[in-house]
Amino acid sequence: MDFDLTDEQRLLRDSVDRLLADTYTFEKRKGYSAEPEGWSRALWSRYAELGILGLPFAEEHGGFGGGGIETMLVMEAFGRALAVEPYLTSVVLCGTALRLAGNAALQSELLPQIAQGKLTVAFAHGERQARYDLSDVLTTAKRKGGGWVIDGAKSVVTQGDSAGKLIVSARIGGERDDGAGIALFLVDAKANGVARRAYRLRDGMGAAEISLSGVEVGRDALLSEAGAAYPIIERVAEAGIAATAAEAVGAMETMQKMTLEYLKTRQQFGKPIGENQALQHRATEMFVALEQGRSLAMLAAMMVDEPDAAERQRNIAMVKAGVGQAARFVSQNAVQLHGGIGMTEEYAVGHYFRRCMVIEHSFGDTGYHLSRLAEQVA
Amino acid sequence: MDLRFSAEELAFREEVRGFIRDNLPDDIREKLQLGHKIEKPDLVRWQRILNKKGWAAFNWPKEWGGPGWTPIQRMMFLEEIQTFPAPEVNPFNVTMLGPVLIQFGSDEQKQRFLPRAANLDDWWCQGFSEPGAGSDLAALKTAARREGDHYIVNGQKIWTSTAHMADWCFCLVRTNPQAAKKQEGISFLLIDMKTPGITVRPIISIDGEHHLNEVFFDDVKVPVDMRVYEENKGWDVAKFLLGNERTGIARIGKSKERINFSKQKAKEMRAHGKPLSQDPEFRRRIAALETELKSLEITQLRVLSAQKANERRQDPLTAVLKLKGTELLQATTELAMDVAGPLAMPDWADELEALSNEPELGPVWATEATRSYLFLRAASIYGGTNEIMKNIVSKGVLGL
C-alpha cells in the first residue's frame, strides 16, 4: 500500500499543470468556449504534442499504456483549470470502448488518430427514456446485406456536436432493459441519416441530440461481437466515473482555494469575513469534503481496472455517490461563501459550480448509485 | 500508487484475527456478543493475554515492550480488535501515557511504569480537564507548590474517566502562576491515587453509567521525581500526547462493527411485514454510511502512507480522521439504536444484569445499542470538541 507517485507520474502531472497554467486563465477559457465547437483545436494539438491524447492507449497505437492513476492526474488538472476540450469523451470514454471491444482493425485505425489529435469521438449511448439505466436502449440495428441499418435517437451526447465519429449503442436483439441484446457501432458523424441538433450544457460544453434514421454501416463498423457490448458499456461508464471523480476533485480544489482567498480579503464590518467562526467552520467542512472526495477519486483510479467485477462495480458506485455529495457540498458552499459575486456569470466560481453539477448528473447521480448499493447490502 | 496490502501485511492481519479468535476468553466474547457490560477484571485479563504475546502496547517500540509495528500493522491490529469485537486495550495506559514516558520520561520513570502500564498492573487515568478549563485547557488552575522534594497539589479535575478504578493519574498542574503565557506555567505530574488528600466523586453520564468523575486534590504530596520532563514545560508534553494518537483516532473498526451489528440485528426485526434488513430505507442508510466509511478508510491509508515517510510530521488530514471518524461513529451507533425500534427505549440494564429465575425481560443487545448511542455522544466532545477542531483547522490549515 502506498500513495506515492512514480517519477514518470509526477512528470506527467507537472507538465500538464504547466501547459494549463500558461493556457488556461479564466479569460482565455471564455475564448475557447466561444469558439464554434466550444473548445480549442489549437490546444487540442498541444495536448497531442504532450502525449496525453494517447495516454491510456497501447504503444502500438501511439499511446503510453497509462492506467487509472495517469488518467486521474490529467483529469484533476483539467478540473482545476476547468478545461473544455473533449478529453473525457474522446480519450477516456471512447478510448475505453475501443480498447475493451478488442476490434483490432478499428483500434489500429482510430486510436492513433485520436492520439494525434486528428479525430474526436463521442460516446452516443444515452437515450431520452433511459435516464441513467445503461441497458435501456431502444435504438435498433438490423442486418442489411453484409452490414447494418441503425434507427433511433440518442440524448445528451456530450461533445457529440463536434465529434468526427460516434460510438453508437443499438439493440440487435432482446427487449428494452435487456443488456444482452445490445451492440456498439462506429458511425461517421456525417453519415447519411445522422442528424445532430447541437446545444450547450449548463457548464458551457457542447452536446447534441442525435437522431439516426436508416443509417447504414458496414460489417466492419461493429465494435465487438454482436450482443457482447453491455459489459463494455458498463466499463465505459465506470471509466467515466473514475475520470470525472478526479476532475471534480480538481474543480473542488480550485473552488476551495478561491473561497479561502475571498474569505481572507473581503472586508465587512471592518474585518475580513473569514474571521467569522460560522464561515471558518463551513470552510473546514469544505476541506473535509474535498479530502474525502480526493480519497474516493484515488480509490476509483486504483479500482477502474480491477478484474473482480463485483468488487470493482461496488467501489465505483461508492465513488460516484461519495464524490457527488462532496462536490455538491463544496460547490454550493463556495457560491454561498462568496455571496452575491458567486452568483455572477462574470466570476469563475459559478462555472466550476456548474461543471460539478453536470458531472454529478453524468453516469448516474448520487441517489442512483446509493440505491444500487442499497440493493446489494448483504 | 497502490491500494493493495503486501503479502506480509495480509498474513499479519490473519495472524491477529487468528490470535483473537483463539485467545479471547469465551465468557468475555459472550458478554460482548450479547451486549453485556465488560468489567475491569475482564479488561485486565484480556490486556494481560495480549501483553504476554507482546501486543498490548501495540504502538510502542520493541525496546519498551511493544511489538515495534509499522503504522499499517497498528491500524490492522486496532481494526481487528474493534470489528471482532474484542475489548480494546486501555487507552490511558497504552496510547496516552506510554508514548509520553518513552519520549519525555526519565529512565527511572520508564523502568518503573512502562512494563506495569503495558500489563495493566497499574490502571491510569488522565487529569487534564477542570471546571474552568475544558476546550481552553491551558486555563487550568490546579496548583502544584514546590516544597523541598515535593509538590503540594491543590485543586480539582473533572470528566476524569475511570478515576474510580485508577491506581495512578497523569495530571497537568500549574507550577508557575506568574508565567507570562498561561501555557508556560504548567507541569506534567504522575500522581498515585492512593495519596492522602485525593477524593474521587462519581459523575453519572446520560447512558446511566459511571465512567466519569470529579477528582479533588487537597494538599496532596507528590514527589518531585514524579514530574515528567522539565518544570513548566508540561504543555509540550500535553501537546505531544494530544497530537500523538493518530492511528486510532478514526475508530473505523468500531464503526464497521456497529454496521455489522445493525445488519445482523435487522434480520431479526420487522418492518412493513418483512425483515427490517430488506427495508429500502434501512439499506440505503447502510449504503450511505459504508460509502463515507470507505472514503475515510482511504483517507486513513493516505495518512499512514505519509507517516511511513515522516513519522512525526503533523498531517492536516488527521483533522479529517477526527471529524469524520467521530461523525461516523455517532451515525453508526444511531443506526444500531434505531434497529431496536421500541426496544431502544427501555432502561432495563440492571434487571438484565441481575441473576434471576424469571425469563429475560428483553434482549440485552437493544439496551446495549442505546447505551452505546448515548455514551458516544461524547465522541465529538472528548479530546477537544469537533468545533474546537474546526477552529484549529481553519487557522492552522486554511490560514483563516
Image (cartoon, coloured by chain):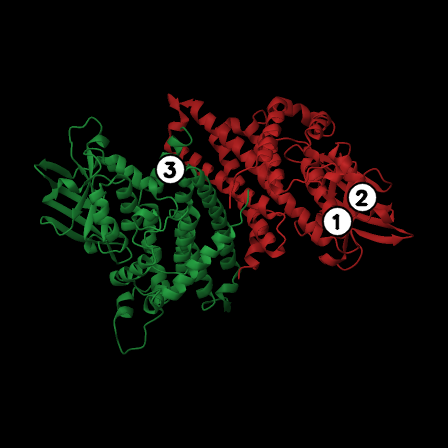
Chain colours: A red, B green
Numbered badge on residue A106: 2
**Location of residue A371 (image quadrant):** bottom right
Which kind of residue does numbered mark 1 sit on? Ala
Which kind of residue does numbered mark 2 sit on? Leu
Task: Answer with left or right where residue B274 lies relative to residue B47.
Answer: right
Q: Are marks 3 and 2 on the same chain?
A: no
Alpha carbon distance from label 1 to label 2: 9 Å
Outermost residue to the bottom: B357
Which kind of residue does numbered mark 3 sit on? Arg
- Quarter of the figure that contains the C terminus of chain B: top left
**Residue at 22% over, 30% down:** B184
Residue topped by disc 3:
B312
Output the chain of dot 3. Answer: B
Q: Residues within 10 Å of mark 3 (few under 14, many from 20)?
A: few
Using the rendered image of the protein, determine whether residue B314 is visible from the camera's viewpoint: yes
Task: Answer with left or right where residue B251 lies relative to residue A213.
Answer: left
Element assignment for label 1: helix
Element assignment for label 3: loop
Q: Residues within 10 Å of mark 1 (few under 14, many from 20)?
A: many
Residue A28 image position (x, y, % from top left):
64, 22
**Front one among B355 and A346:** B355
Q: Are marks 1 and 2 on the same chain?
A: yes
**Location of residue B26 (image quadrant):** bottom left
Residue topped by disc 1:
A101
